Image (cartoon, rainbow, N blue to C red):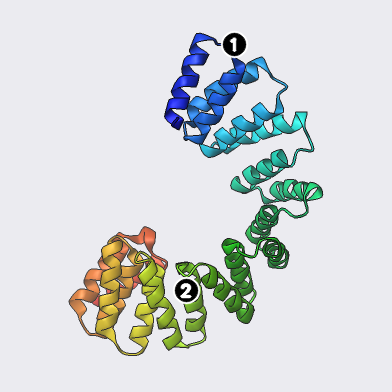
């Protein structure tokens, strides 16, 4: 029987017998499994009105709200579940995750830490704790948590990636490179690992290696604007202005309203003494100022100087 047939059958049972609470419970699970979360909330709300002390019902409606990204309602539901079963790790974990989604890292840390009092081998909890500390710019604590997550699950690609990012943040580039390499061992198509390796190589002025990583980044993610920007800068440094322009124009096809790309094209045109193109792209950069990382005043001053 397909899920849709199961939902239809259970719906008919509930219609014919509204007091068949077991069928209604099964219906809520089937609805959530297929992504019908709004209908699941309706069914769960009815069940909660009948069984207000059922912690699992409050937990399940929290999951439904969570899936709909209504985190304030999810938080209330998980808190209600915990009021009946305060030591249930699943309830603690989900409430911690909601606080993480709401960017309340301190409260998230509180609940994730509580989870670990009951299960010290929960790699997901260590990972999420690491994310909380990462958000708080507490790299040392984040690194410890990501390491613990990896000790429990060495194939956790995201934990390896975030661990590498934290090492990169504190300037331990050797450890960062080691972790990015591990990411790529487990997931050769992880474009962000290539990009971050390229960024480090560019910083070290190892342009050949940076280009190698950037070309792989662009191959895997043709919409990575930042990769094109660094790639074009390296080509410009080496005097390869035509290639730099071609790369930026290719990037512009993916995002024609990117102010940064227009500004970079303007600078290439300036170096090539193509004043008409220089002015055109400066104007486009100003027009798309909301995607500029260069101060708008700087660009306007350049345009004023170019046209005076």
Depicted 28 relative to depicted 103: above or below: above
Left or right of 139, for residue 68: left
Depicted 214 relative to depicted 251: above or below: below
User: What residue appears at the point 37 percent right and 74 percent down from the top-left corner?
Assistant: 229
User: What residue appears at the point 60 percent right and 73 percent down from the top-left corner?
Assistant: 179
How far is disc 2 from disc 1 in space, using C-alphas? 57 Å
* Residue lying at the far right of the rendered structure: 117
Quarter occupied by the N terminus:
top left
Residue 270 visible at all: no
* Residue lying at the far front of the rendered structure: 1
In this view, the residue in front, 140 or 94, is 94
Determine contact: label 2, label 1, CB under 8 Å: no
Disc 1 on helix, strand or loop?
loop
Q: Quadrant of residue 44?
A: top right
Residue 82 visible at all: yes
Local crowd size for mark 1, using a 10 Å CA cut-off: few (<14), some (14–19), many (≥20): few
User: Measured from the top left, where is residue 20 in percent x and y?
Assistant: 59, 14
Left or right of 240, for residue 8: right
In this view, the residue in front, 208 or 7, is 7
Disc 2 on helix, strand or loop?
helix
User: Measured from the top left, where is residue 21 in percent x and y?
Assistant: 61, 17
Mark 1 lies on residue: 19
User: Measured from the top left, where is residue 159 in percent x and y?
Assistant: 61, 63
Q: Which mark is residue 76?
A: none
Quarter occupied by the C terminus:
bottom left
Depicted 266 relative to depicted 89: above or below: below
User: Measured from the top left, where is residue 76 in percent x and y?
Assistant: 65, 32
Q: Which mark is residue 194?
A: 2
In this view, the residue in front, 138 or 278, is 138
């Amino acid at each position: 029987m397909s899920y849709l047939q199961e939902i239809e059958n259970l719906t008919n049972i509930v219609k014919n017998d509204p007091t068949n609470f077991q069928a209604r419970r099964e219906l809520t699970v089937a609805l959530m499994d297929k992504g019908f979360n709004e209908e699941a909330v309706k069914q769960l709300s009815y069940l909660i009105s009948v069984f207000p002390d059922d912690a699992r019902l409050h937990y399940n409606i929290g999951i439904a709200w969570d899936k709909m990204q209504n985190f304030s309602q999810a938080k209330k539901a998980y808190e209600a579940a915990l009021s009946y079963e305060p030591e249930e790790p699943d309830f603690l974990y989900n409430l911690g995750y909601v606080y993480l989604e709401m960017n309340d890292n301190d409260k998230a840390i509180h609940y994730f830490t509580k989870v670990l009092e009951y299960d010290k081998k929960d790699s997901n909890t260590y990972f999420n704790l690491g994310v909380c500390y990462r958000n708080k710019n507490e790299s040392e604590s984040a690194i410890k948590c990501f390491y613990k997550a990896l000790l429990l699950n060495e194939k956790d690609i995201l934990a390896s990636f975030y661990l590498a990012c934290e090492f990169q943040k504190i300037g331990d580039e050797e450890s960062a490179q080691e972790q990015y390499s591990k990411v790529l061992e487990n997931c050769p198509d992880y474009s962000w690992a290539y990009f971050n390796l390229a960024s480090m190589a560019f910083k070290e002025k190892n342009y050949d290696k940076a280009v190698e990583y950037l070309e792989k980044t662009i191959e895997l993610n043709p919409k990575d604007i930042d990769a094109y920007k660094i790639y074009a800068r390296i080509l410009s440094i080496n005097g390869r202005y035509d290639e730099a322009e071609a790369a930026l124009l290719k990037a512009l096809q993916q995002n024609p309203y990117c102010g940064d790309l227009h500004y970079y094209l303007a600078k290439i045109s300036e170096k090539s003494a193509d004043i008409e193109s220089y002015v055109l792209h400066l104007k486009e950069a100003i027009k798309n100022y909301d995607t500029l990382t260069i101060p708008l005043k700087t660009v306007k001053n350049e345009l004023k100087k170019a046209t005076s």
